[in-house]
Image (cartoon, helix red, strand yellow):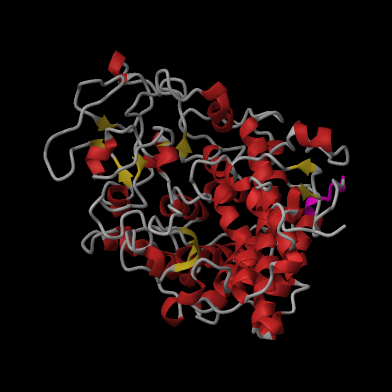
Amino acid sequence: MKRTLKKSIYIAATGILLSGINACTNLDESLYSELNKDSFYNSKLEVMQAALRPFTHMQAWLAPTGQNGYYYHAELSADQVAWPQKGKHGYDGGDHFRQHYHTWTDNEGRMRSGWVLIWSGVGYINSAIADLSEVDHAALGIADEEMAAILAELHVLRAFHYMKIMELWGNVPIATEVAEEPLNLPTQPKAAVFEFVKTELETYVPQLLPYSTELVGRVSATAGYAMLAELYLNAEYFVGTPMWDECIAACDKIISGDAGGIGGAPALAGDLTETFGNTNKNAKEALFQFAFSRQGGFTFDWGGFFMGYDNMKDVLNIGYGGWNAFVVIPTAFDAYADNDLRKQEWFLFGPQYKYGTNEQILGTEEWNGKPFSYVNSIRRESEGDVTSEGSMAEGEENSGARFHKYKSGTLDDVNYQENHYIIYRLTEIYFNKAEALMRKNGGTATQEAVDLINACRERAFAPEDWPAARYTTATLTMDELLAERGREFIFEGKRRTDIIRFGRFTNGSWWDHEPTNDATRELYPIPHTQIAINPNLVQNPGY
């Protein structure tokens, strides 16, 4: 049977028939339905199109662009971001309540969507590896080293997919080939999945090209070593084996510049806006990013999850609104000192004014026709409740501080909505190395660890405030390191993994969330629909 470019219609790991999936996960597009692979790979451009297709698909489940993939579950199950009901809006069958309170079941529609999105990506990668391994690259003018790097990108990207799959579901099948028909592959233990990810990364990351301007939006050496650093940092949680020295070595590959960087080596941004602004395609701190571009027709649209209603268009002078969905949990906003510049730069809070004026905008729901302000509470203040803790069921249109970390610029800005989405940045590598140093030292900060964190934190304080805000070996405790990770990486899809690693996911309290003290909640259930399709899948304990 001759394979075509739509051979990834089946994902071997799950036995899911994927035809008919909507939007960017639709693998049955007519554009490719009759295009045979033997007549496609006729140029380097076509090789790169096949190699990059899995990467463009990945934004559907990793970036906060309105799909229900990894990002939705990584943020809404943790202690910083929630999607409360706001009057008649946002209950959505209790989906977001169950994430917040850790009461999800194996029949969550958004979880099923996330499963299909991520495994579809594995299928795309397996397909590309199979096809490109057979291409006569020399005939297309592609040198052996370059072709090896292209294939290495795909292997590393697949390992990244499996690392995130392992984080969410733990024990899963391992599929490295595309099936011509559904195959019911057996579940592998998490230790086997970890070893697969580790082996793939350790084998192929050294073959990646150093990061440079030409590799923005691709998997370069900085991306690969950042993945290794994350895997090693979480190894003790994943498989019970600490890998602190390995984490430190991977971080050093990036910090030293050996893995490349914009301008030759990565460097910390000098302020809080450079890395997330609408000219961040050349951000010197970036290590791995989605190369979104409105002008290129591939916009980073964070508005759905993060923007308020359309009245916020007048505040920011922008052309997009949102669902008024995600808000900052009050205890997370309280974690910032009042003089922390991140509290001013990365959030919308307090009275909201029409752009460039002192005219306060008006509400449209509970505060209809009244001056509008975002408040650090989630309760029915319009009905007189200004003292209770509130709950997920008691939100209003203005409840909670809001996302303002990425800034699109105004409608008349030549770079309006040209923001790239940053997957890894140098600050995270500093934090990872510092944590590994501290854990290796029995949980006590070394001076090197303190220096790494202070180098990142200093941007968040005015010069006159910095002497009191800087850490010492006495003040940088493990608890404080976790708190600072939260303040620095809020909205970046990192929090669930962090609080699991620190033992705070099932045992921690925040706002109105009480501990479940149920370790089985550290993994999500395999969607019951997938077990019905593939009886060799084994449900995770506790479900």
Residue 516 appears anywhere in the view: no
What residue is shown at x 72% (from left), y 43% (from top)? 18
- Where residue 291 sits in the image (x, y, percent)? 47, 62
Residue segment shown in magenta: 184-191
Give the prevailing secondary structure in the magenta stretch. Answer: loop
Q: Is residue 77 above or below residue 209?
A: above
**Of 481 and 413, the residue lying toward us:** 413
What residue is shown at x 55% (from left), y 52% (from top)? 59
Quarter holding residue 269:
bottom left
Q: Is residue 154 left or right of residue 86?
A: right
Of the 4 image quadrants, the one containing the C terminus is: top right
Name the residue at the top extreme: 383
Q: Is residue 258 magenta?
A: no
- Where residue 331 sits in the image (x, y, percent)? 41, 37
What residue is shown at x 56% (from left), y 44% (from top)? 74
**Of 252 and 204, the residue lying toward us:** 204
